[in-house]
Image: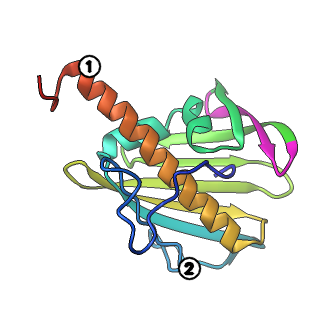
């Protein structure tokens, strides 16, 4: 996405997850995700990451689809809001540089797919798809096209962003259930 998210970090072999409520165990091994091959596309590197998440697909997608939530799971983003239609304005600090920019952000609720991008020389763009696994579980697949060449760093950033997205969506889902007194002992 636009950058790194803060800890918590996703599962590593031998760990139990982020918390009792949310676990994320991702795959960023260069294999295809969602039918997209890994490799070069328009002289850009394609980075892909997927992870299971203990949050219902609808709740996870709804949380991710709101641009105002971007700072909650993308640590470099300090502010994001819609400016009209599919246009968003973002304030971020990327590798020590303050950036004010405009891009596009499209959400398709029917397919639970987000697409975003920043037009320009690098034509940065990405896609996030939330798949329903069943019950309170879903699977997130992210595809990012960027001119950035450090695959290891980008994959780590994607893993951290998905982990923080899962935490934020789980907190919102739990708060909503508490407000409705669903699943809480009285």
Q: Residues within 10 Å of mark 2 (few under 14, many from 20)?
A: some
Q: Residue at x 31, y 47 (%)?
A: 21
Earlier in the chain: of badge 1 and badge 2, it is: 2
Mark 1 and mark 2: span between their CA atoms? 41 Å
For the residue labelled by badge 1, is the local secondary structure a helix, a strand or a loop? helix
The image quarter containing residue 173 is top left
**SS under mark 2:** loop
- The residue identified by callout 1 is 179
User: Which quadrant is home to the C terminus?
Assistant: top left
- Give above or below for 98 relative to 26: above
Q: Which residue is mark 2?
A: 30
For the point 61% across and 40% down, the residue is 105
Instruction: In this rendered view, identify the residue nearer to me: 166 or 14.
Output: 14
Q: Which residues are magenta?
A: 85-97
- Image coordinates of residue 20 in percent, x first then y, are 30, 50
* Residue 172 position within the rendered picture, expressed as x and y whole percent measured from the top left: 38, 31
The overriding secondary structure of the stretch rendered in magenta is: strand
Q: Residue furthest top?
A: 179
- Left or right, 181 with respect to 155, comes to left
Asked if residue 15 lies left or right of residue 183, the reply is right
Q: Nearer the viewer, residue 146 or 168?
A: 168
Which marked residue is nearer to the observer: mark 1 or mark 2? Answer: 1
């Amino acid at each position: 996405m636009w950058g790194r998210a803060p800890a918590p970090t996703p599962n590593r072999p031998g760990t139990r997850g982020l918390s009792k409520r949310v676990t994320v165990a991702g795959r960023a091994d260069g294999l295809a995700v969602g039918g997209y091959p890994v490799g070069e596309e328009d002289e850009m590197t394609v980075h892909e990451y997927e992870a299971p998440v203990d949050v219902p697909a609808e709740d996870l997608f709804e949380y991710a689809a709101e641009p105002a939530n971007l700072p909650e799971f993308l640590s470099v983003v300090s502010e994001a809001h819609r400016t009209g239609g599919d246009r968003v304005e973002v304030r971020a600090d990327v590798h020590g540089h303050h950036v004010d920019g405009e891009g596009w952000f499209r959400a398709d609720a029917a397919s639970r797919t987000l697409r975003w991008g920043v037009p320009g020389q690098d034509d940065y763009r990405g896609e996030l798809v939330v798949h329903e696994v069943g019950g309170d579980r879903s699977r997130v697949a992210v595809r990012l096209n960027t001119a950035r060449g450090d695959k290891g760093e980008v994959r780590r950033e994607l893993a951290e962003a998905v982990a923080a997205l899962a935490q934020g969506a789980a907190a919102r889902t739990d708060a909503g259930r508490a407000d409705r007194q669903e699943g809480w002992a009285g």
